[in-house]
Image (cartoon, rainbow, N blue to C red):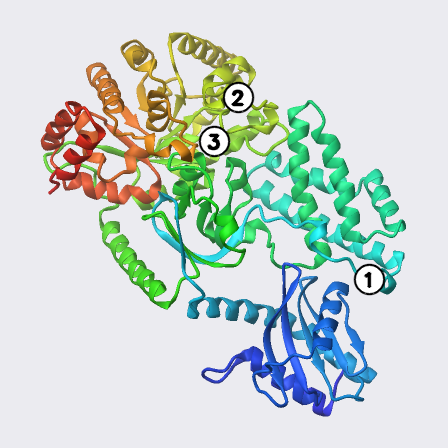
Amino acid sequence: MVFKDQSAKTFSHIARALKVSKHGERPLSRIVQIVREHFNANTCSLYELRRGSLTEVAADAEDSPEGDHVPEPQLKLAELAAKQGEAAFEGDIGAVPLVYQEKTVGILALQKPPGNDFPPMERRFLEFIALQVAGAIQSLTIAERAKSEIQEDRGVMVIQGIAVSTGFGIGPALFLHAGITSAGFAEPDPSLHSTKKEWERLESALRKTSEDLAVLERSVESDFSKNESNIFNSHRAILSDPDFLKNLKMEIDAGQGALKAVGEVLQAFMHSLAETKSSSIKETSVDLEELRQRLFENLMGMESRQEKENWSGILVAKSIGPSDTMRLDASKLLGIVTMTGGPTSHAAILARSLGIPAVMGAAGIMDKISPGSLLIVDGDTGEVIANPGPSILQQYEILEEKRVADLVTLNTIAYEPAVTMDGHPVHLEANASFATDVKRLRYFGAEGVGLFRTEFLFFKGKELPGETEQFEIYRRMIQDADGLPITFRILDAGGDKLIEALHMEKEENPILGYRSIRLTLSKPEILKTQFRALLRASAFGSLKILIPMISGMEEVDAIEGILAGVRKELSDEGIPYDPKIPFGLMIEVPSAVPMAPLLVQHADFLSIGTNDLTQYTLAVDRNNERVAPFFQSLHPAVLSFISQIASVGLKAKKPVGICGEMASDPQIIPLLVGLGVTHLSMIPSCLLEAKKIIRGMNYEECHEMARQTLQAARIDEVKTILANFRRY
């Protein structure tokens, strides 16, 4: 379509307004002014469609540059155009949708003087403008909304939570579990749409949803494995299932709107699955809620729910399970806030591993703010600040400048050894949860991976990863490590880490239940497959094997038997592997502490999991924020256990490491070194600070300070000793 003369000139002006604007001029205001003047209209407004509602973002009126008085008929027609997803004209009023990436993101509406209708050519030109500038206007709308939120103090709200991952992030709130219900939106007026039209609308949403899932499936399979992507393939199969489509068609033919039809059909399907006795099928019914949300949003043409992988902002959720991370692009998350959880929950560990500022236990936050609210997440103080004003933002800008300056200074010691001033070496390693973490270890001065949590390879799959798949992942990691050793902890499932492929039943007390080594020993084929993959990978570089949650010799005997059988199989098959792979035992259960002198005889090294050791010693669920104050790793009993294990290692001349959260605490590091711990493994972002501390302290002084703490009877006494300890 070609427009000439005045129309071409008008569009040229709009294009120029999108590219440049005078100082202090809002491009969106300029655009509505140009459109109003071209059509000789009395008023012109630009609306943004967010969560099914229209919000005016720019307006211009003939008698008021600010467009303060929007005629009610114009607003109603704009709402109709948003619901229909099509242009609407009624006499002297016109409203056209702004469609970006197949979604309605806004409405451009105007009202001319009475008696001045829109002729066909003007209608086409208005639709042409909307089509051409929808994407640019969408970007400008988001930018101006963010700018207004930063510049305007809309009532600062501070919500106190638990600081679990250091640093801070600033951005819009993104609700992980924000849902849409069919009751929340009015269906189009049946008189305006035929049954055929409504079915076409639903078919379009089904196609769009299937395309979205296909893209997501390819992305997840590329980043992780086929197992992790299977869930999206299953959802696509449902969308094309004849019975599913038949039920939808019946609802539409009966006069239902598309939104309500989807809601009722999927709800019935989910209800029937939830009634079954199979835990795996029940979990499938929960997964279908996400499919329903996708269909709702595509039907509504909403932009509020971006794909999780493309989210950029502050993730806000009631809770975050380990499998949720499979669908999140950590590079685009500016912070994490959850209503539940604490510093040693697995969500917190993941946040620290990914270097994302996080606050947990922020009770009620999802009821106090709305999606899109500007937030500051302070992972140092535990504060979540909603709607911060200019002065608060300026304070954090100064903090950011200081943080960057400190990081530059720390980088100068990245390749220096972690040795105390009196020559005592400490080995610093990194914890990792994802295969991609390994590539950047050297940038932080890590001497290897002290803990790789292999369970994250098992999440979100209908089937367990096979030997070949695991082998390829382990081999690639070893090659990426380029000579640095990797300690692979075998599958540690159960508790709050449910593996779908294992069809795990929920337990009354999962922390003390069917989990970790208890679970895998009951399914020896899982251990055998993992051991075969690990041993095969050992031919390509340095690795260690770590067994979690050992409580006694019986478990060690069983593990050694399975491992010996795997070694024999590989030898008989002529498959190369390293016969001297270091074998370690993880001390996390109090019963293992007095058994340590025996356990160490069957291990090349010991690793203390201080998170679980503290949890089990003090009888505190580390995922329960209500008892979070009782989770104290500096409890004298916990310190006594660490000291006993370190002494056993020293006597046997074998390394003893810590891979729990204590290892990265700057104040606790001198104590751990003084107690005799030889290896500290932590999230990569903490390594440089830890190295700085070690290089600035004296080992003999740390040893004396540790002796004093072991004589303390109370936690406060320990904290006082640490606070008074002088580091040079």
Q: Earlier in the sequence, mark 2 or mark 1?
A: 1
Q: Nearer the viewer, residue 87 or 523?
A: 87
Asked whether the beta carbons under mark 2 and mark 3 sit within 8 Å of each other, the answer is no
Amino acid under disc 2 = Glu
Say which residue appears at 68% left-offset and 23% top-offset: 278
Q: What element does badge 2 sit on? A: loop
Amino acid under disc 3 = Tyr
Front label number (1 vs 3): 1
> For the residue carrying disc 2, how many other residues have a C-alpha within 10 Å: few (<14), some (14-19), or many (20+)?
few
Q: Quadrant of residue 88?
A: bottom right
Amino acid under disc 1 = Asp
Q: Which mark is residue 508?
A: 2
Question: Pointer 1: what residue?
Answer: 189
Q: Nearer the viewer, residue 287 or 235?
A: 287
Say which residue appears at 66% left-offset and 81% top-offset: 44
Between the C-alphas of marks 2 and 3, the distance is 35 Å
Q: Quadrant of residue 439?
A: top left
Q: Which mark is residue 10?
A: none
Question: Pointer 3: what residue?
Answer: 474
Q: Position of residue 573 (x, y in %)?
A: 54, 15
Q: Is residue 652 left or right of residue 144?
A: left
Q: Quadrant of residue 171?
A: bottom left
Quadrant position of the C terminus in the picture: top left
